[in-house]
Image (cartoon, helix red, strand yellow):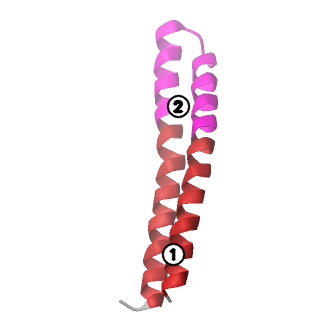
């Protein structure tokens, strides 16, 4: 496999992983928050709380993934 193909595959993998890491917790938090708000009649307190928690956890996870992908990218560059 040539180096440019490896670079593109790496970029698509990272892009997809970051997109999923950002989208899934936000969507799940919004759905769970809406359900809890309806159940307890606390609109929009539960939704805001769960979205805030999802945001903080997503930020922590993204920092770790950026470091991981940074190391993988350096390894990819050093192979050339």
The nearer-to-camera label among 2 and 1 is: 1
Give me the residue at 43% from left, 86% from top. 5
Residue found at the far top of this picture? 40
User: Based on the displayed image, in which of its 4 quarters is residue 66 positioned?
Assistant: bottom right
Residue nearer the viewer, 9 or 75: 75
User: Based on the displayed image, in which of its 4 quarters is residue 67 positioned?
Assistant: bottom right
Marked residue nearer the N-terminal end (2 or 1): 2
Residue 50 forms part of the magenta stretch: yes
- In the rendered image, the quadrant that contains the N terminus is bottom left
Residue nearer the viewer, 28 or 68: 68
Per the rendered image, the range of residues in magenta is 28-57
15 relative to 40, above or below = below
Q: Kindly identify which residue carries mark 1.
A: 75
Residue 59 forms part of the magenta stretch: no
17 relative to 54, above or below = below
Give me the residue at 62% from left, 50% from top. 63
In percent of width and height, residue 62 lies at 58, 50
24 relative to 71, above or below = above
Give me the residue at 62% from left, 37% from top. 55
13 relative to 41, above or below = below
In percent of width and height, residue 68 lies at 53, 59
- Tell me the tag on residue 30: 2
* Crowd rating for badge 1 (residues with CA inside 10 Å; few <14, some 14–19, many 20+): few
CA separation in Å, label 2 and label 1: 38 Å
- Tell me the tag on residue 1: none
Predominant SS of the magenta segment: helix
**Secondary structure at numbered mark 2:** helix
Q: How many marks?
A: 2
Give me the residue at 59% from left, 11% from top. 42
């Amino acid at each position: 496999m040539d180096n440019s193909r490896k670079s593109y595959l790496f970029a698509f993998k990272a892009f997809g992983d970051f997109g999923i890491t950002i989208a899934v917790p936000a969507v799940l938090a919004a759905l769970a928050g809406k359900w809890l708000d309806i159940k307890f009649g606390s609109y929009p307190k539960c939704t805001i709380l769960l979205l805030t928690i999802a945001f903080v956890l997503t930020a922590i996870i993204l920092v770790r993934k950026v470091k991981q992908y940074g190391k993988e990218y350096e390894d990819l560059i050093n192979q050339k």
